[in-house]
Image (spheres, coloured by chain):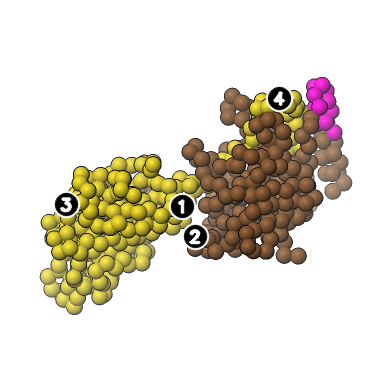
Chain colours: A brown, B yellow
Amino acid sequence: MHTVAAAVFAVSGTAVLTCTATGQEPRLPVPAADFGPPASAGPAPSARPVRAAEAVAVPPPVAVTVPRAGLNAPVTPVGVRKDGSADVPANPAFAGWYRHGPAPGAPRGSATLMGHVDSRTGGLGEFARLADVALGDRAVVRRAGAPPVTYRIVRRVTVDRDRLPASAFARGGPPVLTLITCAPPYRPESGGYRRNLVVTAVPDPG
Amino acid sequence: MMNLRTSAAVVSTSVCALALMTAPALAAENDRATVSVLHAVPGLTVDVFANGDELLPDFRPGTLSAPQSLPAGSYDLKVFRDGEGPRGTPAVQKKIDVPAGANATVVAHLSADGKPQLDAFVNDTAKVPAGKARLTVRHVAAAPPVDVRAAGTPVFKDLANPREASADVAPGTLKADVVLAGTDTVALGPADLKLEEGTSTVVYAWGSAADKNLALKVQSLKDLHSAPSGVHAGFGPDSGNDSRTWPGFAAGAALLGLAGVVAVRRSAARGRA
């Protein structure tokens, strides 16, 4: 394991040097390497999806926190934009919960929260702090009229934005919390950020 | 305003309706098909026989059978008045080809001029776009062509027996009614239709206008949802005056991604050793 850690550190160091060499100083937190199993854009798990009746019975989320990373965002329900992409609240302090999928605390599938990495005025979005999350960090989702749900972060992947893992919006399979934001590179001529940062967490009863 | 995907889908009344309308891709699935049966002939309890075997005994008007998995193939369907089969004269009879992988609803119903008939409708099990619900209306009533309205606005126009029309629409509760085509004369409804995201709701208008027993029957197809096409969660460094240096971050992220791959590969190699 020492070898691996050293390799990661070495490359991180190179990255910082590269940034410095350009004469520009990055103000965004540079993320540590992704962790957990790599992303695969395959079909969603074939387990029975959550029925609407069950989904309705689970109260909606109102806020999400990752205390160690300093992330704290109110949550609002969102749907789908005209272009078929998931809606994201314009206010980068907020996260959107994909209301057509399972809610946090549902027995099956992915409860998906999405937030902007930055703001229109160039500031950072609350979900930019996903760059700081580490394996094992706790994520807590507060809900309307129900106890909070606590998760443990098990995975972070950076994927091309058209290659989101199928698990990100799964309606069946084991219950997970999926947190999504954007990641560089930024290509204004082809619609903005080219990649997504996807963090996966599993329920943590302890 | 509703976003209509299709106008009117054709439903063939030929014996090979199913064969014509099924995509070849479905055929490879397996040798079975999913078939439901709807009894939409008022006032007649029946027994349904397929190839001489009783498929549905004591089948009452307005009943939709649960989907059954049947071997693909050709079925000689006979519908008898309760207790008169299988050697008597069927009330209605038809040969229907059911290809492998198909999902279909066979409907015993009245023609526009009130004669019992059998038709097979292929159920569209294609995925519904994210954030949408599929609505299909099938006219199987002894009645003239109709318009189907949502909150008073025509959604499907001039739908005649035995045709269907379908569209992917915003999910939610729809107040729907059925009017004689081109008029405001309400033939049926209004009724609240609950359209769930990622599902298909098939509504049958059945019965007889002359006998004043027109009714709606709803069939639901679940688990047709799709994931959104993506998550666009950034405005970009050009959106403000802040001179944040994203290229450096990008380079770092790319290299770190590479490092991650190396790390995973090494762990995997170690795991094998």
Tell which of B128 and B121 is nearer to you: B128
Whole-angstrom CA distance, mark 1 to mark 2, is 9 Å
* Percent x, y of residue B228: 53, 44
What amino acid type is highlighted by mark number 4? Asn
What amino acid type is highlighted by mark number 2? Ala
Quadrant that contains the N terminus of chain B: top left
Whole-angstrom CA distance, mark 3 to mark 1, is 32 Å
Left or right: B200 in relation to A60: left
What chain letter is assigned to the residue under label 3?
Answer: B
The verdict on a common chain for dots 3 and 1 is: yes
Q: What residue did someone put label 4 on?
A: B241
Q: Quadrant of residue B201?
A: bottom left
Q: What residue did someone put label 2 on?
A: A52
Identify the mark nearer the N-term, 4 or 3.
3
User: Is residue B169 visible in this depiction of the protein?
Assistant: yes
Q: Element at badge 3?
A: loop
Marking on residue B144: 3
Mark 2 neighbour density, 10 Å: few (under 14) some (14–19) many (20 or more)? some
Whole-angstrom CA distance, mark 4 to mark 2, is 45 Å
Whole-angstrom CA distance, mark 4 to mark 1, is 40 Å
Residue at left offset 80%, top offset 22%: A22
Marking on residue B197: 1
What amino acid type is highlighted by mark number 3? Pro
Q: Magenta includes A17?
A: yes
